Image (cartoon, rainbow, N blue to C red):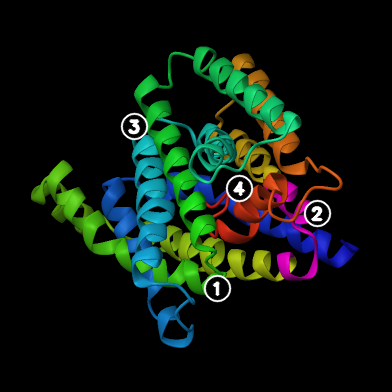
Amino acid sequence: MDRRDSLLAALVATIWGFNFVVIDWGMAGVPPLLFVAVRFAVVLLPAALWLRRPPAPWRTVAAVGVFMSLGQFGFLYASMAAGLPPGLAALVLQAQVVFTIVIAAGVLRETPSGAQVAGVVLGCVGLAVVAVGRGGSVPLAALGLCLLGALSWGIGNVVARAARVGGGLSLTVWSAGVVPVPALALSLLVDGPAAVADGFAAFGWQALLSTLYTAVLASLVGYGVFNTLLARNPSAAVVPWVLLAPVVAMTSAWLLLDQVPSAGEAVGGLLLVTGVLVAVRTRSAGRDAEHRPVAQVEELVGGRAEHRAADG
C-alpha cells in the first residue's frame, strides 16, 4: 500500500480500537442488549434509504445480521457490562480469526495450511494464558461471553463466505435490519421491562454520543474506508492493520480509564495477536484456484466479514 492508504488503514484501526472505550463509556445505566438495539437502528436508518440492497437472498443477509451483528455485539456488549475491560474485550474478540479458520475447515472443507494450523494453536494458547492471567477483577463469565461473540462472528464469516456475499458497506447496513427488534425483545426478556424503561430514561447525551460514534464512525465510515482499501490493495496488505485495534483499545483504556493489563493478559494477548497475524499473513505459492484457504480466509476476515475485528 502507498503512504496514503497506510495512513487510512491506521486511522480505521484507531477508530475501531477506540470504539471499545466509547462503548464502555456510553453504556452506563443502559442495558447492553438495549444499547445494541439502538446502535443498529442508527446504522440501518437512514443509510438503507440510499444504499442498494446487497446481491444476496434475504435469508443470507438475515443470517449475516444474526451472527455478525446480533450475536457478535450482543455477546460483546453483555461481556463488557459483566465486567470485561474494553482493552481485553478488543483483544479476545480477535479470536474470531481462529474460529473462522476452524469452522471453514469443517464446514467448507477449506483445508488449512500448516502455518495456519500453527497460528490457530498459538492463538488458542494465547487465549488460555489470558484466561488464566486475567486477574480477579475480570469474571470468567464475562470472558466467556466475549468468546461467544467471537464465535458468532466466525460463524457469520463462514456464512458470508459460503454464499459469496458481496456488497461491502451495503451488507453491513442491510443486515443490521434484523438486529433492533430481536435485541430489544431479548433485553425485555433478560433485563425486564422496568430495566428497559429505566435504560431509555438514562439514555442521555453520553449514550447518544457513544451510539453516534459506534454507528456512524465505526460502522459506516470505518467500513466504507476499509472496503475502499480492500478494493485498491491485496487483502494481505490491509487485514493485518486490524491488529492495531486491540493495541489502541488497551492503550486508550490504560490512559483514560486507568485499566492496566496484567502480565498474563499482556503475554496472552501478544501470543493471540501473533497467532492471528500468522494465520492471516500466510501464503502458499502455486495452489490451485479452487483450493486457496489462506486467500479465502483473508477475504473472509477482510472483505466478507464486514463487521471486522475491531468494530466493538
The N terminus sits in image quarter = bottom right
Question: Could you tell me which secondary element the residue under label 4 belongs to?
Answer: helix
Crowdedness of circle 4 by 10 Å Cα count: few (<14), some, many (20+)? many
**In front: mark 2 or mark 3?**
2
User: Residue at the spot x=60%, y=53% of the render?
Assistant: 300
Q: CA distance from mark 2 to mark 4?
A: 19 Å
Up-down: is 117 above or below 24? above
Q: Earlier in the sequence, mark 3 or mark 1?
A: 3
Q: Is residue 37 left or right of residue 87?
A: left
Query: Which numbered dot is residue 167?
Result: 1
Query: Which numbered dot is residue 237?
Result: 2
Q: Which residue is mark 3?
A: 82
Question: Could you tell me which secondary element the residue under label 3 belongs to?
Answer: loop
Foreground: 61 or 33? 61
Write down the region rendered in magenta. Answer: 230-242
Crowdedness of circle 2 by 10 Å Cα count: few (<14), some, many (20+)? some
**In front: mark 3 or mark 1?**
1
Q: Amino acid at mark 4?
A: Gly
Q: CA distance from mark 2 to mark 3?
A: 36 Å
Residue sitting farthest toward the bottom: 50
Q: Amino acid at mark 3?
A: Ala
Question: Could you tell me which secondary element the residue under label 1 belongs to?
Answer: loop
Tell me residue 151's x, y (percent): 45, 38
Tell me residue 273's x, y (percent): 68, 32
**In front: mark 2 or mark 4?**
2
Q: Earlier in the sequence, mark 4 or mark 3?
A: 4
Q: Which residue is mark 4?
A: 17
Foreground: 271 or 142? 271
Q: Earlier in the sequence, mark 2 or mark 4?
A: 4
Q: CA distance from mark 2 to mark 1?
A: 21 Å
